[in-house]
Image: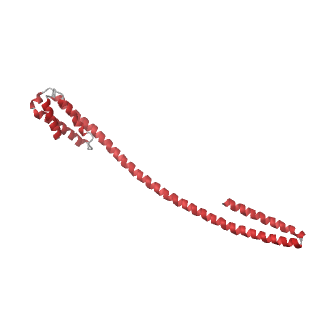
Amino acid sequence: VVSMLAMGWVNGHLGSPEQPYLHVTLPLVLITLPLPVGLGPRLALNLLFAAALLGGYFSYRADYLASNMVPYGLSLALFFALISALVGHAGFLLRRQNFMQARKLEAHSHELEDKVKERTVELRRLVSKLETTREDERSRISRELHDELGQQLTALRYALAYVRTRYETEPDAVGPNLVELDKLLGQTRQTIRGLLQAM
């Protein structure tokens, strides 16, 4: 306000309202455009600046008030004050809206990060459970391989030893034993195939 008074007073020294000095300095009221204030305070501040500029100007010489250009200067000062208030307020609303949207985006970003962390923990837990299940299945298959296949191979070994002994004493009676050996081999093959498919 003091600067505007001083600027008006200096312009009063430069010349009368018919000169362009007053009218050229009136756009200085637009200096309030970037201020982050509401419409009411902004309008009051703009009118105060315009009044200070005009007051400083006319305080130098009171006879300037008799000029035909005074209404033009007053209307120009009012115009700049109103334009500055409206445009400045629109800018303020846009900045405030951008700020609020940025806050919302930040909040959503934090929410998403938290959800990603939760899902990551859940996925790790599921992968761990899957690995445990795989290991359990491998252990089960390994036991079955060892138990079932071991039993069948042992039975085959004893059957073969029996057939060998019997062949030495009664070669013609070995036929049914060979059928039994073939049956045991088929069962062993089926067991191995089933275990391999289970893997």
How many numbered marks does the figure carry? 0
Residue 150 position by quadrant: bottom right
Q: Name the residue at 20% across, 33% down.
A: 26
Residue 36 position by quadrant: top left
Image coords of residue 75 (percent x, y): 19, 31
Judge whether 15 appears above or below 33 on screen: above
Front residue of 186/3: it is 3
Front residue of 151/68: it is 151
Locate the C terminus by quadrant.
Answer: bottom right
Color theme of the render = secondary structure
Q: Name the residue at 19% across, 38% down.
A: 49
Front residue of 70/168: it is 168
Image coords of residue 136 (percent x, y): 61, 65
Q: Name the residue at 41% across, 53% down.
A: 110
Q: Name the residue at 25% across, 38% down.
A: 85
Residue 183 position by quadrant: bottom right
Image coords of residue 192 (percent x, y): 72, 62
Judge whether 181 appears above or below 90 on screen: below
Locate the N terminus by quadrant.
Answer: top left
Image coords of residue 69 (percent x, y): 16, 27
Give the left or right position of residue 91, taking residue 24 as reference.
Answer: right
Front residue of 68/26: it is 26
Give the left or right position of residue 92, taking residue 150 as reference.
Answer: left
